[in-house]
Amino acid sequence: MPRASPSEEHPLSLAVVTEESALERGRVLARAGGRRILGIAGTPGAGKSTLARRVVDELGSTAVYVPMDGFHLANHELRRLGRADRKGAIDTFDAAGFVSLLRRLRSPDGETAYAPLFLREIEEPIAGWIPVAPDVPLVVTEGNYLLVDQRSPWREIRALLDEAWYVETDEAVRIKRLIERHVAFGKSEADARRWALGIDETNAELIRMTRQRADVIVQLG
């Protein structure tokens, strides 16, 4: 069933937990019965995907990782829309497609569902890459905009999550990671820094505004 409004559940402040405490919360969710969906949000470079993968690695066959990044619009469509120069912004994703998949994953129909994966090596999403068997108890998804409530259909996501974490890390570490990631996938050092402090930071400002809609803050080192 959809959750109550997170703003009603957390009107003042959120608990800050360690990575180990978060992993235990993941184990509890996987044992809760039925299909559960854990959402992990945070700013670019905060460590969302690393934490999501660790949860899934810890839980083995009882969890599967379905990242929001698989719903990046293809590069040719971004060029058509004039958005290629700010790839990663909230309007460069197929939000409706992501919401539809979450609804299907929340209520398994007895068939394996397939989710897309974003391949950074080619900077493109690939359909049908991630199989989600109907008997897997926990789906772990992560992405920048899971907790956004000002825009449709993004605002529908929070009610589809059984639990939501917001990941935070040291800002200097986060920016360093972002620059290194951009360089690793083909940008020059100057372009990587410009993107991290420009496009990525604009996106981060929006994401920080969604922090209070999480259940807990996971503080990473």
Image (spheres, rainbow, N blue to C red):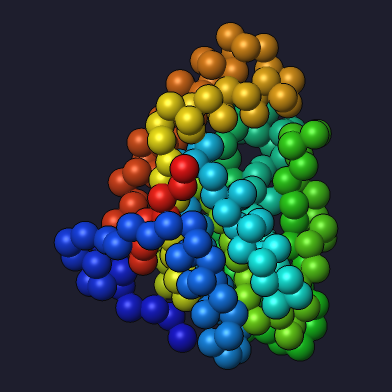
Q: Is residue 76 left or right of residue 177?
A: right
- Total count of labels: 0
Location of residue 8 in the rendering, given as x and y in whole percent from the top left corner: 23, 71
**Would you say residue 214 is visible in this rendering?**
no
Instruction: Please name the residue shown 59% across and 46% down the image.
Output: 93
Q: Is residue 76 left or right of residue 221?
A: right
Instruction: Please name the residue shown 29% across and 57% down the image.
Output: 212
In this rendering, is residue 115 above or below 61?
above
Location of residue 199 in the rendering, given as x and y in whole percent from the top left corner: 49, 26
Residue 73 placement: quadrant? top right
Instruction: Please name the residue shown 27% across and 61% down the image.
Output: 14
Which residue is outermost to the top?
A: 190
Name the foreground residue: 194 vs 151. 194
Name the foreground residue: 111 vs 192. 192
Location of residue 188 in the rendering, given as x and y in whole percent from the top left corner: 67, 12
Q: Is residue 61 left or right of residue 7?
A: right
Residue 171 placement: quadrant? top left
**Would you say residue 56 is visible in this rendering?**
yes
Location of residue 185 in the rendering, given as x and y in whole percent from the top left corner: 73, 26
Name the foreground residue: 183 vs 87. 183
Q: Is residue 146 left or right of residue 184?
A: left
In this rendering, is residue 41 above or below 172?
below
Residue 35 placement: quadrant? bottom right
